[in-house]
Amino acid sequence: MALRARALYDFRSENPGEISLREHEVLSLCSEQDIEGWLEGINSRGDRGLFPASYVQVIRAPEAGPAGDGGPGAPARYANVPPGGFEPLPAAPPASFKPPPDAFQPLLQPQQAPPPSTFQPPGASFSYGGGALQPSPQQLYGGGYQASDDDWDDEWDDSSTVADEPGVLGSGAYPDLDGSSLGGVGAAGRYRLSTRTDLSLGSRGGSAPPQHHPSGAKSSATVSRNLNRFSTFVKSGGEAFVLGEASGFVKDGDKLCVVLGPYGPEWQENPYPFQCTIDDPTKQTKFKGMKSYISYKLVPTHTQVPVHRRYKHFDWLYARLAEKFPVISVPHLPEKQATGRFEEDFISKRRKGLIWWMNHMASHPVLAQCDVFQHFLTCPSSTDEKAWKQGKRKAEKDEMVGANFFLTLSTPPAAALDLQEVESKIDGFKCFTKKMDDSALQLNHTANEFARKQVTGFKKEYQKVGQSFRGLSQAFELDQQAFSAGLNQAIAFTGDAYDAIGELFADQPRQDLDPVMDLLALYQGHLANFPDIIHVQKGALTKVKESRRHVEEGKMEIQKADGIQDRCNTISFATLAEIHHFHQIRVRDFKSQMQHFLQQQIIFFQKVTQKLEEALHKYDSV
């Protein structure tokens, strides 16, 4: 007899390989064995695919034996399901599920546990803008970055696991049982913030199935959870924040302020702007010369105290910032290289890339003031190793990441955003980034090809012309006429001039085209960040639309839907502020770089003209 199951709740498929279910629908199971919380079966419409195991009840034929016995072959997972059709006990949550601090209060009923949702359906594909979704830095580095002893130096590792931080309270120190958004002051300048608006299933259990009320009264409907655990919206904590599951202590210094400027939302300016130079790349050794590395000297203008950092220190900092700021575009570092790391050209190119990176970091109103970035710039690890390690451990234990990060966002008071206008702006920026990425890729290819021709082809062609002129001069010398000596020398000088012009062509890309390609590489990294940033904002908008639909259907209180919209507005403010900052630095950088490019082109052709004029004057005395 074919295995069958009855759907306990509605389920809407969101990814390829899944099928939708309707409450009370009877399905045919392909196997009773679940795969990480998912079953495969065929619904009443003939669609075959995956669905959550906790959304269905397996229908068993009654067998002889003690009452309630599921049969000798019944798996333990379903052994407690009576034939009468009571709701099953919850499946064990997946290993990656972390309940909120007060998730185990008596008010939370067992059937409210969320269904497991960590399985990636086969053949699923997550795309953005028509292309494959690139993994975000958070996906690449993971949620909790831990440096291995093999990869990090003595200055990064010690026997302790966390720095001493007296007075720091965890986000779960005081359960927020009354559901208020401001639980009070936990310490000086530290405020208990929570997005929970009630003790309903939506704010506690997240992705659990909806409750059913036999009385027929309006239910406290919940906005569905995204079952794609690989979604940036989920991994960034944006979904948990929008659904009201974030709760933690926020210090005054952690607040990130968005203000209304003449062009809309923007980050509050850094009151203490600074710059940072990167100079003196020096090869150093450790372990008695067994290991070598390049150290760079950094000098911030606001301290004037030099610190020395290696590339892996930059890499660690980038991972911390990319994990902490899901709606901020952290510029990508110059690419790594397995071989030739100590060659002069590579070191020079990497230094220029790090200068561009540092310029963007110091220019960002939020990143420039971040504690971990300031620790990186100001703590002299060579002289105060303990302070350096404590700052490093503190950054790695930062609690204001994920959903809690969004609690640190402070938006303009009484400022409402029009969702349609926001969506239009985001869609417009999405089209802009796609077009800019395509054009930047094309310009980079053109510049690279042109530089290659200058270094090889143009140089060779000009030297060939010069050699031909010298050949003519040598032929003329065979006449041995005294009055022709001046002409012979002038023609030979012309040949030398063309040789020199060929060398000028070969050296010129370093002056003009290479800086343009360095800038394009940096901005291609920025453009690669924005699909994930936009995905977080789009996910929040989707939850708002779903909550509004529930209100129209009478399934959700308007106060709860308003809370979702307010939290979506917070994400939208931050996203629009980041877009505004991107356009600001884009105008600044490309204006400066194009001016530099054209100035270098003018200087180059002036040098070429000078060489030709010198050759011309040689004929005056002939």
Image (cartoon, helix red, strand yellow):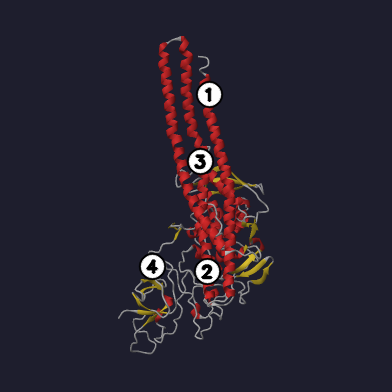
- Local crowd size for mark 1, using a 10 Å CA cut-off: few (<14), some (14–19), many (≥20): few
**Distance from Cα at disc 1 to Cα at disc 3:** 28 Å
Give, as a three-letter code, the residue at label 2: Lys
**Distance from Cα at disc 1 to Cα at disc 4:** 73 Å
Q: Is residue 465 above or below residue 249?
A: above
Give, as a three-letter code, the residue at label 4: Gly
Q: Nearer the viewer, residue 269 or 318?
A: 269
Residue labelled with disc 3:
514
Mark nearer the N terminus (1 vs 3): 3
Are the residues tagged 3 and 4 within 8 Å (C-beta)? no
Residue labelled with disc 4:
17
Q: Position of residue 611 (x, y in %)?
A: 52, 25
**Distance from Cα at disc 3 to Cα at disc 4:** 47 Å
- Local crowd size for mark 3, using a 10 Å CA cut-off: few (<14), some (14–19), many (≥20): some
Q: Quadrant of residue 197?
A: bottom right
Are the residues tagged 4 and 2 within 8 Å (C-beta)? no
Tell me what residue is drawn at x 31 percent, y 79 percent.
2
The answer to whether residue 459 is visible is yes
Q: In the displayed structure, does residue 24 sit left or right of residue 357?
A: left
Q: Position of residue 601 (x, y in %)?
A: 53, 35
Mark nearer the N terminus (3 vs 4): 4
Q: Residue furthest right?
A: 188
The disc label shown at residue 545, or none: 2
> Circle 4 sits in a helix, a strand or a loop, which is it?
loop
Residue labelled with disc 1:
613
**Distance from Cα at disc 4 to Cα at disc 2:** 25 Å
Are the residues tagged 3 and 2 within 8 Å (C-beta)? no
- Local crowd size for mark 2, using a 10 Å CA cut-off: few (<14), some (14–19), many (≥20): some
**Distance from Cα at disc 3 to Cα at disc 2:** 47 Å
